[in-house]
Amino acid sequence: MKKSPGMKIVLLFIIAGLIWIFFLFDLDQYFSLANLKNELAAFKDYYGQHKALTMVIYMAAYILMAALSLPGAVIMTLAGGALFGIFYGTILVSFASTIGATLAFLFSRYMFRDWVQNKFSSKLAAINKGIEKEGGFYLFTLRLVPIFPFFVINLVMGVTTIPIAVYYIVSQIGMLPATIVFINAGTQLAKIESPGGILSFNILLSFVLLGIFPFIAKRFTEYAGQQKVFSKFSKPGSYDYNLVVIGAGSAGLVASYIAAAVKAKVALIEEHRMGGDCLNTGCVPSKALIASAKLLSYAGRAKEYGFDRVSIDFDFAKVMDRIQSVIKKVAPHDSVERYQGLGVDCIQGRAKILSPFKVRVNDKILTTKNIIVATGADPMVPGLPGLEKINYFTSDNIWDMRTQPKRMVVLGAGPIGCELAQGFSRLGSKIILVQRGSLIMKKEDPDASKIILEKFRAEGIEVLLNHSAKAFEVSGKEKQLICDHEGEKVRIEFDEILIALGRVPNVAGFGLEELGVELSGNKYIETNEFLQTNFPNIYCSGDVHGRFQFTHTAAHESWYSAVNALFGGFKKFRVDYGTIPWATYTDPEVARVGLNETDAKFAGIDYEMVKYGIDDLDRAIADSEDHGFVKVLTVPGKDKILGVTIVGNHAADVIAEFVLAMKHGIGLNKILGTIHIYPTMAEANKYAAGLWKKNHAPQKLLAWVKKYHTWMRK
C-alpha cells in the first residue's frame, strides 16, 4: 500500500486527538484499583444482565487502550479476572491485549519504519540481521520478562523487519503467562470482603505469584535459550572438569586461580609458555628495557644533576640478556609448579573446542561444564608489498635481537611503538618513528602527546607524522620503506624495522568458528555484559574480545568470567569498566583513567577542567623532572571526577589515588583534605584538587568575610 504523507498526517491527528480526549476528561481516574473496587458490584450486575455485550465492550476498550498505548493495562487485566473469572478473563485479555499491541505495532510500522530504516540503515543492519535470525525468540523473551513496558516494545518492534504474523503469534504466547497471573490476582481481589480477607491464602498466593513471576520467567527464558543453543550437541553423563581455561596469559591465569580457590576442578591449557605475552614478550621485557635505557638517559643528563660528565660503557647483547634474566626471575609467579600447587591441572598443548562441553588437547578429550577462552592477541602485521622480502621485528620477537641496529624504523606510534622507540634510541640506535596520523599516542589528549613528541625529538628520535606506509623495497643490502606523505612518495632507509601497529585477537585454530562462536567484524569474540559468548557456558576474557588490551584489565575481567561461569546459575555479575586506568611508559609517563577531553568532546559530555603544571611541584624540581601536568575533568559545578590524565615522572603510580577516588565516588574535596607526604610526586594530586577548589570558591561569601575582618580591625 502506498503511504501518502496526507494519510499519515490524518492518522497522526486522529491518534493524538484520542489520547488528548483521554487525558482532557481525566478518564485515567477510572483506571485505578480504588475505582475498580468501588464499581465492581455495579459491573457484575450489568454483566449478569448483558454477558455478551459486556465482553464486547470490555474487549473493545482494552484493544483501544492498548493500541493507543494508554495507561491502565494492569487495572483492566485485574478487572477482567474480577468480572469474568480465570477462564473467560484469560481468553478476553489475551486476545484483546495482543490485538491492541499489534495495532500499535502496525501504527509504528506505517508511520515510522521507512524513515527510520532509511535514516539509520547502516546502524540498523546488525539489528535487522539479528531480528531476522532470532527475532521471534527475542520478542518472546521481552514479552515473558517485561524488561521494557509493553507499549515501548510495540512501538520499537514496529520499525524493525519482524513479520507481522510472527509478531502476533509470539506476542499472544509470550504475554499469556503474565496474563494468567494477573487474571488470577483479579479473581482474588474480588473476594476481599474485609481487612482479614487480605491475609487469606489465595490472596497472598496471587500476590506472591505477581512478585516472583518475572524471576521465574527470566529463568525459563534463559533455560529455553540454553536448550536451543545446546540442542545440536550431546551432553556428557558426567564431566571431567567444572572449568577448562584456554590460554595461560594474565586472563587465563587469574581465571584458573579463582576457580581453584573456590575448589572447582579446573584445567589450564597453554600451547607455548606460561605467563603469556605479558611475561614473555610484553609488559615485563619492555619495562626491563626501559629501565636499562633510562639509566643511560640519566648519564646523558649528568650536568642537570651537578656532574661534569658520566660515562657508561655497555654491551647491547648484555642489555638484552638482562631482559631475559628479568623474565626468568618473574616467571615462577606464573609457573606450572605454582599453579599445580594451587590445584590447577596445567596441560601443555594446543586446545581445540569440539563442542560446548568437549575440548581436545593433544590426544585427549576433556569434558567440561564451562569453558573460558583467554587466547590473547598477536601483533598485527600489514599486508604491504615487499614485506615478505625482509626480516621484520614485532613486539613478539624483538627480544631475540642481540646486534644493535644502526638505523631502525618503528612503524606505528601507539603505546608499544613509542615505548620501544625511546628505549632503543636511548641505547644508541638511530630511530625513525613513522606514524600515519597527525599525532603520536592518538588515544591521549593532544597536549599530552605533544609533550612526548617534543621529548622524542629533543632526544634525537626522527618522528615522521602523516606518513602512510605503502610498500617495502630491497636492493642488495639496502632496505627502504615507501610512504605517502600528503601525496608525495617518501623513501626511508633502514637496517631493521619494528612493526608496532597494534594487536589482533588470537581466534584461529581453536575451533571457535567451526563451533559457531560469534565474532565481530574485527574478528574479536563477541560477548555480553557477563563475558558470555553466544554459547551460555563459553566465556572469554582478555585481549581476545578486544575491549581493553591491558594486562590488568584481563585480570579484572577474569574474576567475572570465572565467577559467572561457575556460579552463573545462581547469580551473574556485569563487568565493571567504569574505572579502567592505563599508562604508556615513555619518559615522561602518560597515565589516564576515565574520560579525557578528546573523548568528552566527541561524546558531547559537559565537563570542567583543571590543570596543574608539575613544573611547580617541589619534588619534581628536586629530581630535575619538573615537566608534565595533572589534568582533571569534573562534572560542572561539582567535585565528582570524570577522568584524569597525568603526564610526568611516575605518572602510572601517581594516578592510583584518582583511580581509587573514581571507583568509590570520592570527589576532589576529599582528595584536597587528605594529608600527602612532602615532598612527593603524589602532592600534585592535592594541588590539582586545590585549583578546583580555588575556581569554585564562594566569592560573595568571601566578600562578606573580608568586610568582617575589616570590621574586626577597627
Image (tube, helix red, strand yellow):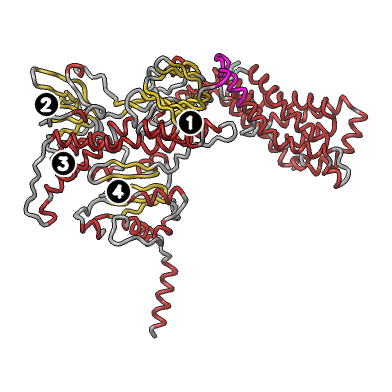
Find disc 2 in the rendering and name its residue.
493
Kindly identify which numbered label has been placed on residue 651.
4
**Going from the N terminus, do you reach mark 1 or mark 2 first?**
2
Tell which circle, 4 or 3, labels the residue nearer the N-terminal end. Answer: 3
Give above or below for 579 relative to 540. below
Q: Is the Cβ of the residue at disc 4 closer than 8 Å to that at disc 3?
A: no
Q: Secondary structure at mark 4?
A: helix
Name the residue: 42% across, 23% down. 520
Q: Residue 179, percent across and down?
A: 74, 29
**Is residue 439 visible to us here?**
no
| Numbered disc 2: secondary structure | strand
**Is residue 278 visible in the rendered structure shown here?**
yes
> What residue type is disc 3 on?
Arg
Q: Residue at x 43, y 78 (%)?
A: 708
Q: Is residue 498 magenta?
A: no
Q: Tag 1's secondary structure? A: loop
What's the residue at 20%, 55% (across, down)? Answer: 623
Q: Residues within 10 Å of mark 3 (few under 14, many from 20)?
A: few
| Mark 2, other Cα within 10 Å: few <14 / some 14–19 / many ≥20 | some
Q: Nearer the viewer, residue 537 or 9?
A: 537
Residue that carries the numbered disc 3 in the rendered image = 457
Say which quarter of the image contains residue 285. top left
| Quarter occupied by residue 250 | top left
Total label count? Answer: 4
Which sits in the foreground, 260 or 696? 260
Per the rendered image, the range of residues in magenta is 222-238
Mark-to-mark CA distance, 3 and 2: 19 Å
Sequence-wise, the earlier of marks 4 and 2 is 2
